Image (cartoon, rainbow, N blue to C red):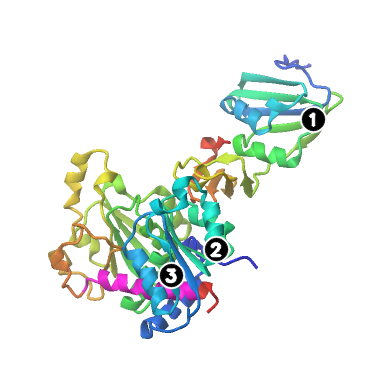
Amino acid sequence: MTMEKELKVAALRNGTVIDHIPSEKLFQVISLLELNNVTNQVTFGYNLESKKLGKKAIIKVSDKYLSQDEVNKIAILAPKAKINIIKEYEVAEKMQLQLPDEILGVIKCKNPKCITNNEPMITKFRTIDKTKALFKCHYCERIVEGENVEII
Amino acid sequence: MAIQSLVSITDYSKEKILQILEKAANFEKNPNQQILNGKVIATLFFEPSTRTRLSFETAVNRLGGRIIGFSDARTTSGTKGETLKDTIIMVSNYADLIVMRNPIEGAARYASEVSSVPVINAGDGANQHPTQTMLDLYSIKKTQGKLEDLKICLVGDLKYGRTVHSLIQAMSHFNPKFSFIAPKELEMPDEYKLFCKEHNIPFEEHTELNEANIADADILYMTRVQKERFTDLFEYEKVKDVYTLRNKLLENTKPNLRILHPLPRVNEIDYDVDNNEKAYYFQQAKNGVYARQAVICDLLGL
């Protein structure tokens, strides 16, 4: 018996698929990867049904293979995302998400009294707990939980 | 080698803490020495402070160093829009060491990264004030003869009080027991309770400052319950007197108990306590000079 799944977003010939993004994080992932500034074809689905997440989002980027660094950045916003590299309509590689130990210039510190919000400078966070996704501002030492992360 | 600075109490290992405390004890025996001769120390106070600034300046003066700096940010180029980075780079061209207080959190860490000379954090907003912690440790060791296995009661504003947070981190090396005594609105943040659990540090929580809750304490660390922390002033009126320490409350405490307070004290310690032999907060402030002399000389490799 064959299971045919209806594709909600067009199939990809070559490129990267980022699946299982929590819906509310979709636009942040797009801006994190600067997909709003590329000339590649990008398609995305939003509020798709997902057994695991309830509502999920998916992004397909044509002719672009994400680097491990880019993939690791996605882990900050969507630790459960699945990332597949597609070549000729086939999954050529499943990339593993690994939270970086040090995150430069990605996360905005939520503390308005933090120096990073008062000087022209690059933010720096350390991942202090990879399973709970806890990040600590290197400067003001406040801790932010993964789900509350705000991207610059 | 990177320039050494003291920004956060967690920059110090247990060994380093003990080494600084020993150095401080030597300065207490002989606080007037000419070892900072020819050195220029900058004290940059972007917000007012009397005790901390005078204590640092006394520490430097007694060791023969010279001081440049300001105690009011309105007299600086910051008012013209100069960044902290530029101010620090400029001052580090002039001085051998920078002492900075700044209301912006993380300012000291950033300053230490752009400065070419050591930076001592003399308070960055609600974040860190490591020399206060060093003088607290010095006072605890001096009055108890040791740092290990002590029962420490922290009283008052445990939510915003940076001194109590740093003290927990620093004491974690010495097998302490803690008791947190605070009104519900100002209780110890989860972050620090979690820190205690992760380091197997036992702690109790109480909402009342009474005889039973301080009966087995070695150190009673009082902090100020600040009116401006309350959204509901009715709540403040209810708790403000509950957290006032009076002589009567101390009658059945342990003979070795000492009362510490980072000062300024307002009404949380009644004046009748000042003459009690267990009151130690003024000597504690005096110890700040020795602790700061030790930190300064350590950073300058002296």
Taking depth in this image into account, of A99 and B82 the one nearest to the observer is: B82
Same chain for the residues under marks 1 and 2 in the image: no
Residue under label 3, please give it: B67
Mark 3: secondary structure: strand
Gap between marks 2 and 3 measured at Cα: 13 Å
* Residue shown at 58% from the left, 57% from the top: B114
Gap between marks 1 and 2 measured at Cα: 46 Å
Which circle marks residue B92 in the picture?
2
| Callout 2 amino acid | Ser
> What's drawn in magenta, residue-wise?
B278-297
Mark 1: secondary structure: loop
Gap between marks 3 and 1 measured at Cα: 58 Å
In the rendered image, the residue lying farthest to the right is A88
Give coordinates of residue B96: x percent, y percent. 53, 70
Magenta segment's dominant SS is: helix
Residue under label 1, please give it: A64
| Callout 1 amino acid | Lys
Same chain for the residues under marks 3 and 1 in the image: no
